[in-house]
Image (cartoon, rainbow, N blue to C red):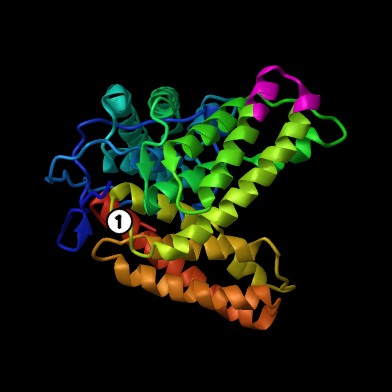
């Protein structure tokens, strides 16, 4: 489904809340971004209420919002602020803001609307306490944000699970790929095939959410067969994890990890023929989440540090980020930054593939700078103000 991005004064406006935000498994709090890469919105800015055409809930947009909401780290915030030595982490404010903005940026299905509204209210209150560096005040608010995030995730994934094949297009594909990629199948395989295999209770929810995301999307081209294979593998892994059968789960985790890697290759490959095809707030959320999670700051530091060397994993991540940038029809104010980033990422790719440290070092600096500019512009526009980072 194509939805219109509403802009004013060069900024992306928030979609009016006919339904609200959602959460995922709190045990799957994977905070992929660091304080250096999580911009915050200036405290005095109030996000703009959008006035736009009526829109129906879109599964792909909800998946994209869940991606940001569930990876913000509310579980960790709750535990830290209500633990023995509570203190505010500087990175939390940006993560909480991005999660709240993501929840406000999409239209939620009626069954998740109440949970989303509660999440937005709780997170808004938490932001104020984090901004004030008030650990004592933030502690009960972190509990509320964590609980409402979990409830939203539960409700939204339940609705999405009941609507297989309900979304398609570049944005939905990006959102599903990102959610599946963040489920942690390589870590599951490594742990379950190691010397002391044991089932982690959080893996059940992470695997189930990844499977639901894969089933929700009508995948482009050859990636549909890869998605079907992944669903089969993930379903088997779920059963073994739920049975607390580490032996069966080990074999299933190997298959799920392999299937996920194949799906990523084919899914991102299919996006090469879908340039500029995605036009919704959810598509923007999915793309910027993928781009920001690559770790260009770390790549830049490593290649321009005292002992530069190329990590083989970087090339695929850079390619995925470039494809994400090219798939989206970015809002006014971010399109030029997205084009600059895609160009810089395209220059970094061959240097990484050739293991050319000198060329990669310069290209990494350019990619990092343009990624930061794109993230800054997008989150400021989505938040209705300017970034504080």
| Residue at x 47% of width, y 37% of height | 213
**Toward the viewer: 356 or 278?**
278
Task: Determine the image quadrant of residue 67.
Answer: top left
- Where does the magenta region start and end? 236-248
Q: Which residue is mark 1?
A: 380
Q: Quadrant of the C terminus?
A: bottom left
Considering every residue shown, the one lying at the far top of the view is 243
Q: Is residue 365 above or below residue 292?
A: below
Q: Check the image and report above or below for 379 versus 74.
A: below
Residue 180 in percent (x, y) is at 55, 42
- Secondary structure, magenta segment, majority class: helix
Task: Tell which residue pokes out farthest to the right in this image.
Answer: 195
The residue that appears at 44% across and 49% down in the rendered structure is 173
Pick the front one: 156 or 337:
156
Position of residue 53 in the picture relative to residue 81 (left or right): left
Judge whether residue 13 can be spotted in this image: yes
Q: Is 241 within the magenta? A: yes
Q: Residue at x 61, y 28 (%)?
A: 235
Q: Position of residue 236 (x, y in %)?
A: 66, 28
Residue at image coords 32%, 51%: 41
Could you say where residue 363 lies in the image, as x and y percent from the top left? 55, 78
Count the numbered circles shown. 1
Please indicate whether residue 310 sits to the left or right of residue 122 in the image.
right
**Based on the displayed image, in which of its 4 quarters is residue 302 positioned?**
bottom right
Mark 1 element type: helix
* Residue at the extreme bottom: 358
Crowding at label 1, few (<14), some or many (≥20) Cα neighbours within 10 Å?
many
Q: Is residue 36 magenta?
A: no
Residue 296 visible in the picture: no
Counting from the top left corner in percent of width and height, residue 131 is at 37, 42
């Amino acid at each position: 489904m194509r939805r219109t991005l509403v802009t004013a004064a060069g900024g992306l406006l928030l979609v009016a809340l006919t339904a609200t935000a959602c959460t995922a498994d709190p045990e799957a709090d994977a905070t992929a971004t660091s304080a250096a890469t999580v911009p915050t919105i200036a405290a005095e800015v109030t996000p703009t209420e959008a006035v736009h055409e009526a829109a129906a809930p879109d599964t792909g947009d909800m998946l994209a919002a869940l991606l940001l909401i569930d990876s913000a780290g509310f579980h960790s915030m709750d535990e830290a602020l209500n633990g023995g030595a509570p203190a505010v982490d500087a990175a939390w404010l940006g993560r909480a803001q991005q999660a709240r903005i993501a929840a406000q940026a999409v239209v939620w299905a009626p069954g998740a609307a109440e949970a989303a509204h509660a999440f937005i209210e709780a997170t808004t209150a938490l932001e104020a306490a984090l901004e004030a560096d008030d650990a004592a005040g933030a502690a009960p608010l972190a509990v509320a944000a964590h609980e409402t995030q979990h409830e939203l995730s539960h409700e939204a994934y339940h609705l999405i699970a009941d609507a297989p094949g309900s979304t398609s297009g570049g944005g939905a594909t990006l959102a599903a790929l990102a959610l599946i990629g963040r489920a942690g199948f390589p870590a599951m395989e490594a742990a379950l095939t190691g010397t002391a295999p044991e089932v982690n209770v959080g893996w059940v929810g992470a695997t189930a959410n990844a499977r639901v995301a894969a089933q929700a999307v009508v995948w482009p081209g050859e990636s549909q067969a890869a998605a079907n294979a992944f669903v089969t593998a993930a379903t088997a892994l779920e059963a073994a994890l739920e049975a607390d059968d580490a032996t069966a789960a080990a074999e299933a985790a190997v298959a799920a990890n392999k299937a996920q890697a194949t799906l990523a290759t084919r899914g991102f490959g299919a996006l090469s023929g879908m340039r500029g095809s995605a036009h919704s707030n959810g598509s923007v959320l999915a793309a910027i989440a993928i781009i920001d999670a690559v770790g260009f700051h770390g790549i830049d530091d490593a290649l321009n540090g005292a002992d530069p060397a190329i990590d083989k994993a970087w090339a695929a991540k850079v390619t995925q980020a470039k494809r994400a940038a090219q798939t989206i029809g970015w809002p006014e104010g971010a399109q030029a930054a997205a084009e600059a980033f895609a160009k810089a990422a395209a220059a970094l790719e061959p240097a990484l593939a050739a293991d050319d440290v000198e060329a990669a070092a310069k290209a990494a600096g350019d990619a990092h700078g343009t990624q930061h500019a794109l993230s800054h512009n997008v989150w400021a526009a989505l938040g209705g103000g300017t970034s504080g980072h």
